[in-house]
Amino acid sequence: MDLEKVTIGIIGGSGLYQMAGLSKIREVQIDTPFGPPSDNYILGILEGKSVAFLARHGRGHRLMPSELNFRANIFGMKKLGVERILSASAVGSLKAEHHPLDILIPDQFVDRTFDRKSTFFGDGLVAHVSFAHPVCPELGNILAECGKGLSVPVKKGGTYICMEGPAFSTVAESNLYRSWGMDIIGMTNLQEAKLAREAEICYSTIALVTDYECWHPDHDAVTVAQIIAYLNQNSQNAQELIRSAVRTLDGSRSCACGSALKTSLLTDPKAIPAATKEKLKILIDKYLA
């Protein structure tokens, strides 16, 4: 199947299962060497730009965080030609100053997962990408600047701790993360960021604060109705921010994300199995020529 080239990808998390404002919509099903993505990709025009939207948990929220095929989701974006991913994610707050409905553009991650596939490599090909700065600074700056026009606070910086789930933290765990200086907690974005870096795609998280984590004395008073209301409002805020960022994005990239593999492939090209070369050719061909 011939796929049209789309340079902007959008991943929607809890509460964001579709993207308002898309026109000329069509769905594409993409096969990957890592299995099926979470759902079909929704292609369309947003603010005059071609974009690809993917519902992270599938439409109807069918997939738990640990069930997500992160590799297929990001590889599918790469096959479409995506160079930048805007990823929206519901999170809990670990600091009093991050209120429900606030938006953070985190610049760091801490990994507390243990049951996730986080790399495209292996099977005879070793790669170690630089991940000291896991979020594209160029894309993060654009999101923060576009956020100044929103009616809710958009804060740049902070650390997202990624837990396995699906259960939420104990109070002891929540207080431990707070003692580490963590800002927000979620279950999905760490693997996306790692794989996007390996795929040489710029990546930034739009972290949508839904509630305070269980460390907060008022946590138990939060009702399901309140959470749903926050999710709905967060979805609207995220879509407004995404539309603004898409309007701003042009075709040029001055960051280092587009060459992340240049010094990361360790295996002698002659030693790479042919099947692995074929599977990953969309990622590595330019470095093996």
Image (cartoon, grey):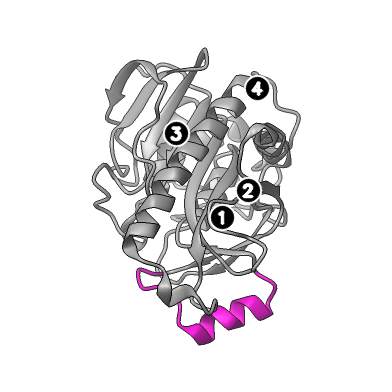
Q: Name the residue under label 4.
A: 248
The quadrant the C terminus occupies is top right
Q: Distance between the residues labelled 1 and 3?
A: 22 Å
Q: Do the residues labelled 1 and 2 touch (CB within 8 Å)?
A: yes
| Residue for point 68% across, 77% down | 180
Residue denoted by label 1:
126
> From this viewpoint, which residue is outermost toward the bottom?
172
Q: How many marks?
A: 4
Asked whether residue 169 is drawn in magenta, I would say yes
User: Looking at the picture, does residue 159 appear above or below residue 253?
Assistant: below
Q: Residue 77 carries which label?
A: 3
State how far apart marks 4 and 2 are (Cα). 33 Å
From the top left corner, tell me how far across and down residue 36 is, in percent: 28, 43
Q: Is residue 192 visible?
A: yes
Amino acid type, mark 4: Thr
Residue picked out by circle 2: 265
Q: Earlier along the polypeptide chain: callout 1 or callout 2?
A: 1
Q: In which quarter of the image is the N terminus?
A: top left
Front disc: 2 or 3: 3
x, y (%) of residue 276?
A: 43, 45
Query: Which sits earlier in the primary sequence, circle 1 or circle 4?
Result: 1
Question: CA gap, disc 2 to disc 3?
Answer: 21 Å
Pick the front one: 66 or 216: 216
